[in-house]
Image (cartoon, grey):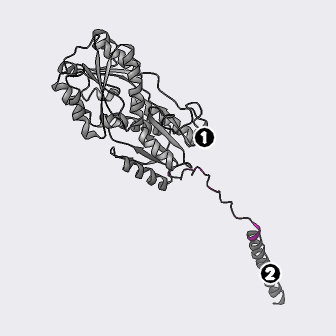
Amino acid sequence: MKRSFVLMLMLLLSITGCGQDAQKAAEETPAPATETPAVEAPATPAGFTISITQIVEHPALNAMQDGFKDKLAELGVQATYNVHIAQGDMAINEQIASQIKGEAPNLVLAITTPSVIAVAQKIQDIPIVFTGVTDPVAAKVVASLEAPGGNVTGMTDMSPVDQQVSLIREFLPEIKTLGVIYNSGETNSVVLVDILKQECAKYGIELREATIDNSAGVTQAAQSLVGKVQAVYVPVDNTVVSALESAVKVCTESKLPLFTADTDSVARGAVAALAIDYYKMGLQTGEIAKRVLDGAAPTTMPVESIKDLSLHVNKPAAEAMGVEIPVAVQDRADKVIY
């Protein structure tokens, strides 16, 4: 009996000792370290958050956005997109920039010049990638194309105005007067029209300008050129392109050939365009964004551009506007609309 009591006592002491050792080990084991989020706001387990700002909806801009998303998906990037469209309203454009700042995304995609100007002025601690911006240096969002500086980089869509004027001259070899419709409030359009003046001067072509403040003025601007010019040119102007059908209607009724600086407008009724493929630009912009999301610094990433151009022609539009498509132009066109 006494022996049994001693054995039980020894067993109890052994169990108590093990418990104390385990408690002591637990107290001495350090808690797992908690990682401090990086300044760039790393992705959550659900993926990255990307805020998109776009001044207005029209096919060329939508194509850039689609290409951007498609490329990131192809590269395996999981992302949630906050898409904001300003509908051509500059006040709303500014409000969107403030809203995006509050969203604190991993990256901002700014489509067009007005959009990137607004976000670049309000956001300095989040990477901004732009696309469809004609002259980012003139817009004061980068210091130079080679070394942007700051938190902004992206792609320029500077139009090949010299080649576009040459294309118009192929259609109309004797052209002496050309009209242009644009929004004088868009920095990109002002830059392009200045270049257009220089190119027209080389060939003795008089350039007549019709400026607008908003898309509602496109019809009146087009009408103001009727009887004064032999053709009309629309640059990469977001305001005019968003209401292109108004210009197409006037030019069709007046037998006035309409040429544009984006290929998507050809399917909407323009005669021809030699321009950038904006979907491809979106794809390339997606590649830039992937590098930024992987940790590359925009400040040292040169602004990129697309060298390959696409030529689209619209035969029914040409016939309706009283001009023939030269055989040489049709033969080299990337797309012919019948």
Note whether residue 217 is visible: yes
Whether 45 is drawn above or below 252: the answer is below
- Disc 2 crowd rating (10 Å Cα; few below 14, some 14-19, many 20+) is few
CA gap, disc 2 to disc 1? 63 Å
Tell me which corner region of the image, top left, top right, bottom left or bottom right, holds residue 331: top left
Q: Check disc 1 and report its element: helix, strand or loop.
A: loop
Question: In which quadrant of the rendered image does the C terminus lie?
Answer: top left
Residue range highlighted in magenta: 27-48
Residue kind at label 1, given as amino acid type: Ala
Q: For the residues carrying marks 2 and 1, which lies nearer the camera in this image?
A: 1
Q: Give me the residue at 22% from left, 16% from top.
A: 323
Q: Main secondary structure of the magenta part?
A: loop
In this view, the residue farthest toward the left is: 253
Q: Give me the residue at 31% from left, 19% from top.
A: 206
Determine which residue is flagged by label 2. 13
Residue 55 is situated, as x and y percent measured from the top left of the image, at 37, 42
> Which residue is at the front of the view, 42 or 192?
192
Note whether residue 336 is visible: no
Question: In which quadrant of the rendered image does the N terminus lie?
Answer: bottom right
Q: Check disc 2 and report its element: helix, strand or loop.
A: helix
Determine which residue is flagged by label 1. 297
Residue 47 is situated, as x and y percent measured from the top left of the image, at 50, 49
User: Is 338 placed left or right of 305 in the picture?
Assistant: left
Tell me which corner region of the image, top left, top right, bottom left or bottom right, holds residue 11: bottom right
- Disc 1 crowd rating (10 Å Cα; few below 14, some 14-19, many 20+) is some
38 drawn magenta: yes
132 drawn magenta: no
Residue kind at label 2, given as amino acid type: Leu
